[in-house]
């Protein structure tokens, strides 16, 4: 199979590969390697596309990698940082709301609610946390019991 790409499309594909590999491997002690062969193949075409400044080849390891120039010009770092920021606030808001919703109404009572009623009620908690974090960030967050924290109460 042959796929014809413009240089612009090729750069976007490299960007997608970078972001996809980062997504699958960023927090793994061992990289999954799931995309290595595809990524190496696509990176090997950079010179042919006139983009050898975006990709480096390590003779010793026999592998290609992205250069700082690629990371800068493609804005992948900014994309990752914005994604992390969005996920942080989304998860914090929704986990806190879920916790407080269950604490306030109890799992048994929630189980008796209609889906619509459950969503509407939980959404009130989500909106409250969105407002709180939108106004104060993490300033008002605290762990209530800090007795097990190293260096505290020793």
Image (cartoon, helix red, strand yellow):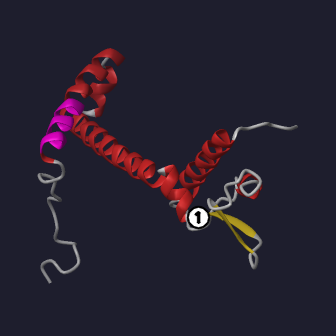
**How far from the left and from the top, in percent, is residue 112?**
31, 20
Q: How many marks?
A: 1
Task: Residue at the far bottom: name it.
Answer: 154
Q: Nearer the viewer, residue 110 or 132?
A: 132
Residue that mark 1 sits on = 67
Q: Which of 68 and 51 is in front in this view?
A: 51
Based on the picture, tell me whether residue 134 belongs to the magenta stretch: yes
Let me know if residue 104 appears in the view.
yes
Say which residue appears at 54% left-offset and 61% top-offset.
69
Density class for disc 1 (Cα within 10 Å; few <14, some 14-19, many ≥20) is some
Give the magenta-colored segment's residue range.
125-135
Q: Which residue is drawn at 18% across and 40% down?
A: 134
Determine the residue positioned at 55% across, 55% down: 22
At a point 63% along the width and 62% down the height, the residue shown is 53
Say if residue 105 shows up in the picture: no
39 or 138: nearer the eye? Answer: 39
């Amino acid at each position: 199979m042959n796929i014809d790409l413009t240089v612009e499309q090729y750069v976007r594909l490299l960007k997608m590969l970078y972001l996809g590999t980062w997504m699958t491997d960023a927090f793994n002690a061992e990289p999954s390697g799931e995309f290595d062969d595809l990524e190496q193949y696509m990176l090997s075409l950079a010179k042919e596309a006139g983009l050898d400044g975006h990709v480096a080849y390590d003779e010793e390891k026999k592998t290609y990698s992205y250069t700082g120039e690629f990371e800068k010009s493609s804005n992948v770092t900014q994309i990752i940082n914005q994604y992390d920021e969005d996920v942080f606030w989304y998860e914090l808001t929704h986990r806190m709301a879920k916790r407080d919703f269950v604490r306030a109404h109890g799992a048994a009572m929630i189980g008796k609610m209609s889906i619509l009623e459950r969503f509407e009620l939980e959404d009130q908690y989500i909106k409250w946390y969105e407002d709180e974090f939108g106004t104060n960030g993490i300033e008002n967050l605290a762990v209530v019991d800090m007795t097990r924290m190293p260096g505290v109460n020793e």
